[in-house]
Image (tube, helix red, strand yellow):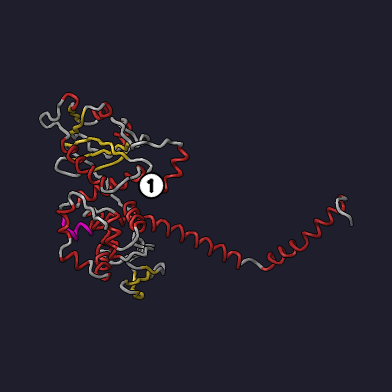
Amino acid sequence: MLLVTFSSSALCDVGMFTPVVLRFLSSEGECVALLRRVRWPDGVTCPVCGSRGVIRWCRYRDYQRYMCKVCRRTFNDRTGTIFHYSRLSLRAWLILIILLILIHTSMNSISWLLDTSYMTVFRASRRLLLRLNQPIAELQGEVEVDEVYQTAGLKGRNNSILIKLLSRKLRRRGLKRRGRGTYREDKVPVFAFIERGGRRLFATARDVTEETILAKPCIKAGSTVYTDNFTSYNVLNDLYRHETVNHSTGEYARGEAHVNTCEGEFSVFRPFISIHRGVAKCNMPLYTSLYQLHRENRRTKAIQALEHTIKTTLPLLLQKILVKALITHQQHSYLRVKTLHIILQPPKKVSLSCQVLKQEPHTQRRKEVQKGTRPP
């Protein structure tokens, strides 16, 4: 018997399965209508050239196919999205988004609920997490900055070759090292940038040096930054109004100076990651983006959260497809010009080249005979 595991906040989020959500998930046509409304709110546009001169071409099952009158390409509502070239139905994709991001269920449980293999759910989830395009906003006002170290090594069947190349010795009881860690030591630093009363950003790093802190999400000049007394945060003294608290002496708050919001966020982050048994450190940025999107949508309605999640996966992929289409268009144009140049060549040059090719073996033989390297 398979035990379906949910996170600590999932029990209160099961209410997302309201009658409105169940209506959208009841058929493939409703899911296609939702995707069309989110992707093209101002009308259908061509994902290749961006033209609005689009007509309806044909229909295949629940999908309407369009044709662009400019580039003559055909496409449907799934073209250019993470749902393109996928054997999973759009209904299964939306259920996956609700269970993984909004409710936060383990992939093993999702594979059981969708009646499909674990690797299918893993690949679909990885494709979804890789396309999360979270815009990095500029934080301002009072901002708390803190870090936590998540244990994550080279786990998984696909990393066995990499472990052999590194010649790393096996660990007896996992990683029990105390103190601050780095990506190389299999303790990945995760930074939290929390604007009091505003946005919350999370980012992974390879270490906790001053250069790494400066390279993370920018904070508007003139803001007040609260951190602990870690020496790497001293680089913020020249940029912002910086106040610290000393945890080693038992000081956790001094007036407005504290990082308790970050500490409370990390108390939710650790159980969130523990649902996914054995996260590889190369995948930590993906799970960090998953956690951030989950926390942003925890207070919104189900349909709005689903639409917001779909929107975050669209812009980056459409830009890549547009660039690829332009390159392909240039290549085809070059091939057309080259073909026309060959066709329009004068026949004399072609016949002359043929004669040269026919005479070339005899000329080579005559030269060899004259040199004496070949008998006459």
**Does residue 238 sit above or below 304 in this rendering?**
above
Q: Is residue 369 left or right of residue 269?
A: right
Horizontal and vertical percent for residue 120?
Answer: 36, 59
Horizontal and vertical percent for residue 49?
Answer: 38, 62
Q: Residue 146: within the magenta?
A: no
Tell me where the magenta segment starts and ends, as one range: 300-306
Q: Residue at 24% of width from left, 55% of height from top?
A: 3
**Given the current orientation, which residue lies at the most extreme right position?**
376
Residue sitting nearer the eye, 291 or 211: 291
Q: Residue at 39% of width from left, 68% of height from top?
A: 70
Q: Quadrant of the N terminus?
A: bottom left
Residue sitting nearer the eye, 244 or 222: 244
Find disc 1 in the rendering and name its residue. Answer: 156
**Given the current orientation, which residue lies at the most extreme left position?**
255
Q: Inspect this view and state whether residue 81 appears.
A: no
**Given the current orientation, which residue lies at the most extreme top position?**
249
Horizontal and vertical percent for residue 163?
Answer: 43, 40
Task: Find residue 265 and report its image quarter.
Answer: top left
Q: Is residue 193 left or right of residue 69?
A: left
Which residue type does callout 1 highlight? Gly
Q: Residue 305: within the magenta?
A: yes
Residue sitting nearer the eye, 277 or 194: 277
